[in-house]
Image: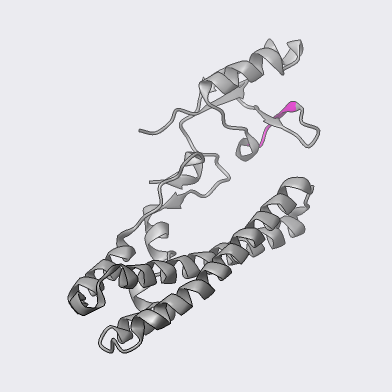
Amino acid sequence: MKLSQYVITDGTRFIYKNHSSKFVPTTNEAMADIFTRRQAEAIYKNSLPKALKTIFYVKKYDASPKCVKQVSQHDLVNNTEKVMVADNIQIWIDKIDDMNGLVKEAKKRKEVLEKQLRDLEDEKLDIEHYIEFQNLNAAQGYKASRELKNCRVKRRSVKNELMVINIILDQKVKEMVGSEVYQRIKGLDNRTYSPRIRTDLFDL
């Protein structure tokens, strides 16, 4: 069930929190802060000056901001790495027919990937805190966004390879059936993302 969203508006302007942590009006709908009903009512009651309270009100918000391009189901399908055709995954698929040393090699690779994943998690956290603590201009914001995206793409590739290795290690090697492994790996391509909070960014 999609969580209802609310804004504080006067019909043409919207309330958002500026860099000074003050709730102020803007005519840019894309900058509007999105709240739950309880959040919106609390901010309206406790954080708006009397002058704004006389003309602004809490309103349910169903439309996405005009300046925001939502992520569609097509975007999710076509912009997500395909596990079955990725080079680093194909290496393991090719090894299914040659079981000699597979488990030993997979365990060794798993240790390397787990270290890479920890490093990428830390890098992602650093970038996110950098964005949080800095007032970035457009160029700086774009660069930070690109770095965060590149980090997440690398992280996803590592996680995909780890999942394939875990599928292999979860099987008893002497009973492993190639077709079963193929099907489980192929099933990874059917995953999709469901937005947790920012449903306004997705059109699913």
Dominant secondary structure (helix, strand or loop) of the stretch shown in magenta: strand
Q: Quadrant of the N terminus?
A: top left
**Quadrant of the rendered structure where residue 93 is?**
bottom left
Residue 172 within the magenta-colored segment of the rendering? no
How many numbered discs sit on the rendered protein?
0
Q: Please, which colouring scheme is shown?
A: one colour
- Magenta stretch: give its range: 23-28
Q: Which of 103/31 is in front?
A: 103
At x 31% / y 89%, what residue is drawn?
100
Q: Which of 85/49 is in front?
A: 85
Can the viewer see residue 56 in this picture? no
Instruction: Please indicate whether residue 180 sits to the left or right of residue 68 in the image.
Output: left
Q: Which of 10/116 is in front?
A: 116
Instruction: Please indicate whether residue 200 sits to the left or right of residue 77 in the image.
Output: right
**Quadrant of the rendered structure where residue 25 is?**
top right
At x 40% / y 81%, what residue is drawn?
104
Q: Position of residue 81 (x, y in %)?
A: 42, 68
At x 75% / y 34%, what residue is drawn?
18
Can the viewer see residue 184 in this picture? yes
Q: Is residue 130 above or below residue 114?
A: above
**Quadrant of the rendered structure where residue 168 is?**
bottom left
Q: Is residue 109 above or below residue 204?
A: below
Q: Which of 29/184 is in front?
A: 184
At x 47% / y 78%, what residue is drawn?
109
Q: Position of residue 91 (x, y in %)?
A: 38, 84
Q: Is residue 171 above or below residue 87?
A: above
Q: Position of residue 132 (x, y in %)?
A: 72, 46
Q: Position of residue 153 (x, y in %)?
A: 53, 66
